[in-house]
Image: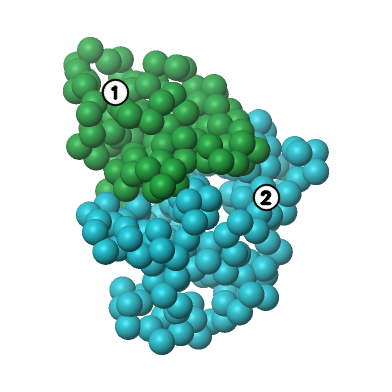
Amino acid sequence: MSTNPRVSSAIPGEPAHFGSVLAHQPEIAESFFALYGRFWGSDVLAARIKEVARMRNARVTQCGFCRNVRFDKAVAEGLGEEVVDDITDSYQASAKLTDTEKAVLVFTDALIHDPQLLTGDARAALQKHLTPAQIAELGLGVTLFLALAKVLITMGLEPEVMDRTVVPTPAVLEAAE
Amino acid sequence: MSGQGAGGPVFAALAGDPVLAEHYANFRAKAESALDARLVALVRQAIAAVHGMDADPIDDTALDERTRLAVAYARRIPFEHTAITDPEAAALVAQLGEPRFVAFSVVAALADAECRAALVDLPGLAAA
């Protein structure tokens, strides 16, 4: 997996990163950040749940940038590192993840890895713990997490080294509403 | 990709939240409109085929070099995204130019994710 940027920054003076590379396509960038802000700004599904799914996607897709970023809204909702550390392939055995979060992780694995994981009891568990509206939002989130991770990796925007970093949660862009 | 209408499975699943659905549709449309419509269709078709979905096979011999290269690259996205090499990416950047390579990367990654959303029946789960 390359850590050499495969596309240059479109913003003079800035290194190549997701925002500066996406700036080659301003309309795509604007629409993405409007969507992502709206998604994270919605409270239909708690930020902690979204972040659990994002962390799982980061691990499975091997997105180092995704894996080291934390959104502050989820941290404020109690998603500490001791919980994140349990989002491994053995997450079903975790005493720190809730049953809802485990159902969300099965859904996440099914979408990003193997759809056969979401049959029978797993599908019923998801529908027991989440409303249809919450599942729709979760599905959007995992779709975006997966696509974003693959864009970062295939454009060579993975960091060689990166500390764990808590950043402000993407917010609704007023101009986009 | 079949079965979810023109907006795809994620848009269909968001029917209960028209604002979020519109934002998603706008993002998808902006990415696709940055590329030739035929290339977008071929990328989506190639990725759907990799997922074993109902997609007609692509006759690579009928494609020009740039399109053939782009389709071959797209086929790597679903299961081999970490194995794409710098020379492979550079070859496609040389053909498309950086702005269109950026759009292509977004379109291909979204197409892959949407196939996966369809395979778990996201619209059905969200409508239950």
Chain letter of the residue beneath label 2 in the structure image: A
The residue marked by circle 1 belongs to what chain? B
Residue A63 vs residue A76: left or right?
A: left
Q: Which chain gets the cyan colouring?
A: A
Using the image, tell me which numbered label, if any, was put on residue B39: none
Question: Is B118 displayed left or right of A69 in the figure?
Answer: left
What element does badge 1 sit on? helix
Taking the view exactly as shown, the residue that stands out farthest to the right is A174
Is B31 located above or below residue B67 in the figure?
below
| Label 1 with label 2: CB-CB less than 8 Å | no
**Position in image of residue A128 (x %, y %):** 41, 63
CA neighbours of label 2 inside 10 A, class few (<14), some (14 to 19), many (20+): some
A37 on left or right of B32: right
Q: CA distance from mark 1 to mark 2?
A: 36 Å
Q: For this view, does B44 lie left or right of residue A147?
A: left
Amino acid under disc 2: Gly
Note the chain letter of the green one: B
* Numbered tag placed on residue B68 in the rendering: 1
> Dividing the picture into quarters, in which one does residue B59 lie?
top left
Please name the residue that numbered disc 2 is placed on: A37
